[in-house]
Amino acid sequence: MEREPAGTEEPGPPGRRRRREGRTRTVRSNLLPPPGAEDPAAGAAKGERRRRRRCAQHLADNRLKTTKYTLLSFLPKNLFEQFHRPANVYFVFIALLNFVPAVNAFQPGLALAPVLFILAITAFRDLWEDYSRHRSDHKINHLGCLVFSREEKKYVNRFWKEIHVGDFVRLRCNEIFPADILLLSSSDPDGLCHIETANLDGETNLKRRQVVRGFSELVSEFNPLTFTSVIECEKPNNDLSRFRGCIIHDNGKKAGLYKENLLLRGCTLRNTDAVVGIVIYAGHETKALLNNSGPRYKRSKLERQMNCDVLWCVLLLVCMSLFSAVGHGLWIWRYQEKKSLFHVPKSDGSSLSPVTAAVYSFLTMIIVLQVLIPISLYVSIEIVKACQVYFINQDMQLYDEETDSQLQCRALNITEDLGQIQYIFSDKTGTLTENKMVFRRCTVSGVEYSHDANAQRLARYQEADSEEEEVVPRRGSASQRGSIGSHQSVRMVHRTQSTKSHRRTGSRAEAKRASMLSKHTAFSSPMEKDITPDPKLLEKVSECDKSLAVVRHREHPLAHLSPELSDVFDFFIALTICNTVVVTSPDQPRTKVRVRFELKSPVKTIEDFLRRFTPSCLTSGCSSIGSLATNKSNHKLGSSFLSTPSSDGMLLRLEERLGQPTSAIASNGYSSQADNWASELAQEQESERELRYEAESPDEAALVYAARAYNCVLVERLHDQVSVELPHLGRLTFELLHTLGFDSIRKRMSVVIRHPLTDEINVYTKGADSVVMDLLQPCSSVDARGRHQKKIRSKTQNYLNLYAAEGLRTLCIAKRVLSKEEYACWLQSHLEAESSLENSEELLFQSAIRLETNLHLLGATGIEDRLQDGVPETISKLRQAGLQIWVLTGDKQETAVNIAYACKLLDHDEEVITLNATSQEACAALLDQCLHYVHSRGLQRAPEKTKGKVSMRFSSLCPPSTSTASGRSPSLVIDGRSLAYALEKNLEDKFLFLAKQCRSVLCCRSTPLQKSMVVKLVRSKLKAMTLAIGDGANDVSMIQVADVGVGISGQEGMQAVMASDFAVPKFRYLERLLILHGHWCYSRLANMVLYFFYKNTMFVGLLFWFQFFCGFSASAMIDQWYLIFFNLLFSSLPPLVTGVLDRDVPANVLLTNPQLYKSGQNMEEYRPRTFWFNMADATFQSLVCFSIPYLAYYDSNVDLFTWGTPIVTIALLTFLLHLGIETKTWTWLNWITCGFSVLLFFTVALIYNASCATCYPPSNPYWTMQALLGDPVFYLTCLMTPVAALLPRLFFRSLQGSIFPTQLQLARQLTRKSPRRCNAPKETFAQGHLPKDSGTEHSSGRTVKTSVPLSQPSWHTQQPVCSLEASGEPSTVDMSMPLREHTLLEGLSAPAPMSSAPGEAVLRSPGGCPEESKVRAASTGRVTPLSSLFSLPTFSLLNWISSWSLVSRLGSILQFSRTEQLADGQAGCGLPVQPHSGRSGLQGPDHRLLMGASSRRSQ
Amino acid sequence: MAMNYNAKDEVDGGPPCAPGGSAKTRRPDNTAFKQQRLPAWQPILTAGTVLPIFFIIGLIFIPIGIGIFVTSNNIREIEGNVFMYYGLSNFYQNHRRYVKSRDDSQLNGDSSALLNPSKECEPYRRNEDKPIAPCGAIANSMFNDTLELFLIGNDSYPIPIALKKKGIAWWTDKNVKFRNPPGGDNLKERFKGTTKPVNWLKPVYMLDSDPDNNGFINEDFIVWMRTAALPTFRKLYRLIERKSDLHPTLPAGRYSLNVTYNYPVHYFDGRKRMILSTISWMGGKNPFLGIAYIAVGSISFLLGVVLLVINHKYRNSSNTADITI
């Protein structure tokens, strides 16, 4: 990156811009007088200041310069860059060799021509790119911006490029920030502003930024002239999510700076009238530009292979030249002394020594045979890839109507890698699922609210999705009406109405897009917004609301509620306020509530705290409520209206009448309909329309919408207060003391608020259940309250398991009431943490942990993340294509497993190996056992394949599926912790080997780092081609590590897309991208590369054979012009067209037969074997093409070049015919280019041979071609030679097509034989393979002999873990499985009731059933070792496992699980029980092995 | 080959415009080219589809070969104009440095090149400080034997056969590429300041008495300057024109060849030959092409038969073939 010296007006000494400044940067105002004008008495301080000032002045200015060249530097610099490519150096070297007279083969200038041509084209392309960059730079540099001028004492308009670090910049609404700016003042009274970061990361939601602390309290408008503080901050870096620094005021006070204070270049100011800030980083030091790394250059596998073969060619070239050189030496030695008339001495008359001659001959031969190294190949490959990228981009079926986006190829040179992928690593959320979070159900205080109506509503969406184009025949059918029920609000009816109108407009997708475009709000499709409340819960909420409204002014209002109701109330308050959702209305500027508390900002100092929490202030809580009377009455009106059944019915009728006209109303939905209706309603709609929630994550928005459905509406969020509106209570304003944001380590977020009703300080925490459940207040089982609490907890946990089993994302909501003393104590440390510069992140983390303890559980929510369209189909297609799919998700195991079932990643009737280990040793032992099991299984299935011992070798070539193709291979589920162990050096081989045997692998709870480690491992160890696909920032590392990274341009911003090689709108496009385009790209390019090798070898062969007849003198019978331009002009176009357009198998066949993809994985088109076969054919053809003209013209009076020209012609025709054999589809373009090539050759030859009588020595081809055209022998040789040369290839190809056709050839033949079959192939083709999948069905009944060594479950690490050798003898269980499962299945077919508390019984239905069956199943074998297992206490994981894995026909689940929630589990078989083992998982590794025969209950 | 003209996809419509039309979408154009649906002929190479090609090749090539073979063999009869060649063997006229060793500008009559020949001619560029007139190794090694043909009639007095010196070189060479340097009438005058090539016995302007065949445009010289492609070659020396239709050009009888031996070839194991031949429509006598055509045609036919057998044998299996993995 070029960095201009800063500031032309500053006469600083040159060369000091790269000065070391330590770890921080100091920024001062540019408005201060320059150092020279300062008071001389400043002394040492002055020197210090000057130094600082210099530093500041030599920072980059804001000029954007992305161009690489200037007019002067272009030529040298571009050439320098081009010569970094070895190929270019080689070609230039060859060309320069021509200038040495002793070795030159061609006219030196002519030899340079192709190289110069290539270089010139590249240079021109670079120049053009650079010029367009320059133009865009210029445009950006000359954008205007208001900068404060010292001279004029006001803001003046300046160009962006004139902004310097330390300048004060003023921006108005909707302007784009020109640099990284520290926010000093905002027109917003709270010192806030909102920015949109879409330009930066694609996220369209608004983010809040805050004025630097200390400046927000300013009463008057900010005056830059008075700014004398010094800012110390980090050196420029590219971390968008981090900014640290402090501002030092004149009085020595320090204040911390955070990322909330920084406005990043490229973002847009929204919702705020104006802001003023000081520039911290400018130009290329801004975070946006530091993040902007150029396009990535990857080398594809095919290219790597090709480069290897190019090296072979080099070797061949050297060998040929060496051979020739030796030959020439011998020839010279033989003829030199014999006074041969044709011997030409050196220019001084003396003779060359044979050795010198040989050396010269060697070099000349290299020049003559240089064509063997295909200069044209590199150029052609670039062109072909560019065209492939173009075609992929243009594919209409990769265009997503909903988002109006198509597939983008960001990496231009790895298209063919798409055809060779063996492993797909996929993220789950947002990749397999839509990342549209929909509130499904919740549990509060141990009571579950199933939200059935809500589920039905979602089902309707599902239905609407599936029958997208279908016009709904009768809107509001009776069943729908019934489902809405009397508890439904009218609002709800409207909403369904609105969705129906969506559907009626025809293309639903279009409507969706329209709504997306019109609203510009993230995460707010109607599906996510309109939640049907559960009647029971709604009742409870309104009960709370009402009774609180009554008792609100009493001493402890909440105490009047029953504990349950109080929990319900808190639950909804937490849902509403425990988030960072911003309430906006984009139509109009944000109107501020001017009624404000005297408390301005979050508590920042102890004094502040003391001042605020004096008793006098405590009453001020709800003072504002009166002012909101109108609003409140509105609500009352509305709600009373709603509660009347008659009006409800009236409305329905009204709705019915209005049905027809409303159907015409497009996506804008209910807001426009509302105008027709009662004014109250309209008002309500109006107010509702204004509220728009902008959340940083879809989960948050979903919860806020859910709360809104229960009339607990988030109406306003300022940085220090949150307002919630309830029907009876009216507007409650919570004072927001702190927000402890979400992070992936804590997995939770909290808000600290002061409750307006109680004036208590409450902490609301929302987080992953695994974390929150551990942080709950320990409750003694002594008093009734504690027991009740415990019961609630276990119930909640139960429901959480149930939710997870349904594939819902679960969140726990908890609360903590802080006493003032506790708070003060915590605040002290928190403030310290905040203000520390060094490791404040760590300190803040600790501080958060201190706060989030002793929580009181309120409830939990289940949010559904729906699968994207077509995901199961895509996965099954990809799997048919031989791809192994791994899902790496951060989600919890249960959720992930269920999503995996939903998307057919796991199959109901396949075995699942679950790896949950808590220690390294356990993991090792478990892996061993799994391996052993899989091995024995493999032994049993395919005895011929295994050789007794599981070998740890990884064959790089064969894809994993082939080894286990005979039987259905199991799937592997592993959690994050076990994964961490498994990825250790000593275990990774085993893990990989196991994973390789598995059909699919699911890694849960994995961190981004683990994701990338897994990919790296597979890539490096298995030497497999990997593809990673994901949508979020947590997938970036994985995407970068994989051979091919695919980003989904979904809802979570663009970070994944930025890092990716390809960006797709939806997961399902992967199918077409890989199976169709990947295959085509691969096969095209592979064939083209092979063809080029063939072409060059064959051409060079002609010259080489000639050496035997010219004394190895490196003479060429082919005119040098033909020699040099043959590749570039005459024979280049047809292979290009074939390389771009050839379709070896038609699209529909490829898509319906995904297994054809395996040809790419196995490198069938381009293997070393194919390469050498190709080279051999080239040698043969060149021999034929040389010898036939040789014999035809033997002992004739033909001259050298008149003989050479037919040979070139023959070569050209042979090339074209050869290409014809290899071309699978002939479009008119192929015909035209082939014809054009021949025509061009003859035209050029004729013109060239007529152009000059004395030019072009030594060939001097005047009138040669013309003479040849009158010679019948010319035609006769040109007719016969290509035919003779290609007969073997044609014969071989047809033999292959008949006797041992490849899959691709078969597919092609099938297309031809039954073209109709391809038109409706879904049924015919797909079913052709289904029986194979289910072919093993009959084998289920046979006796399965599984040798399973069992370990004694061990609770202590001290004991050797999994110590079958140590404690128990290895036991072999012969599980003779009778055909019994259908009887079992009958008994189990009823849905498993999951309501009872966990951990009480072992052999309880359904949890116990697997064991039961296992016992029975195993009864023929040795039961003893098993029984010890089956009497183990059940634990949480068992619950979900049992819900899907009940009976197994033959397989087993190896499940290794932590006993986490085993609070009062009973001791099994005298095993030591750990008291309170609920927490034990964290302290000591306790694990047990469960072998349960299991399979999916057929559902 | 299979004909499967796949044009069905061509039909379905052009770019569907959004009904609103206002929104500019990024939807790609629905054209056959962009969607890779260009109508195409998709040949499939199997025994069944390819075997006609082999038979056709066989059926075409064998008759051609027979035709050529017969023509080539008929050349024996000495009718029409007879061409007299000299042949050299093991003479590497195609050696790289030899081929380059000439100056075409000089041969084209360029006066500056005449006195200052190209460097390519080294070491045959200057001799005794004078430029060599046809410079270079090719010219220097010109064949300079003289061949004379006599018919030994019944009266045992040899009758010289008229050998035509002109008309043996390419017309374009004689008239375009090779020109004598400009100047006065006297050819010697024009070549003033130059010297003869080292190996030559006489200077270039004394090659022939006929002014149209002297100097650079001497046809023997021109023929020699066209370097042979292969180490065994022949070059046209003289024409024996047919006098009348009634008599053969060279009647049967005894002939004697008188060789003025100037050109040593035994040093490098070379051989000299004299060939008399007539020319057919396809050039001189060379049986190879005919044989080659017949051979290739036969092989092709044979392969066709093999494919027929294979096709018969495998047709059933390929009919039921399915893609299986």
Image: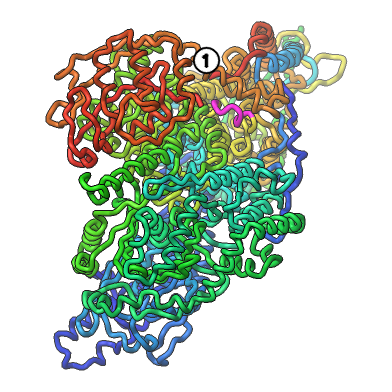
Q: Magenta region's main secondary structure? A: helix
Over which residues does the magenta segment extend? A1149-1155
In the rendered structure, does residue A60 fall within the stretch colored magenta?
no
Quadrant housing residue A1221:
top right
- Which residue type carries mark 1? Gly
Picture coordinates of residue A1161, whole percent (x, y): 47, 29
Q: Mark 1 — residue?
A: A1335
Pointer 1 chain: A
Is the residue A1368 above or below the residue A895 in the image? above
Quadrant housing residue A1087:
top right
Picture coordinates of residue B263, whole percent (x, y): 54, 25
Q: Nearer the viewer, residue A1084 or A643?
A: A643
Q: Quadrant of the N terminus of chain B?
A: top right
Give the image's coloring scheme.
rainbow
Q: Nearer the viewer, residue A1380 or A87?
A: A1380
In the rendered structure, does residue A1151 fall within the stretch colored magenta?
yes
Picture coordinates of residue A795, whole percent (x, y): 35, 42
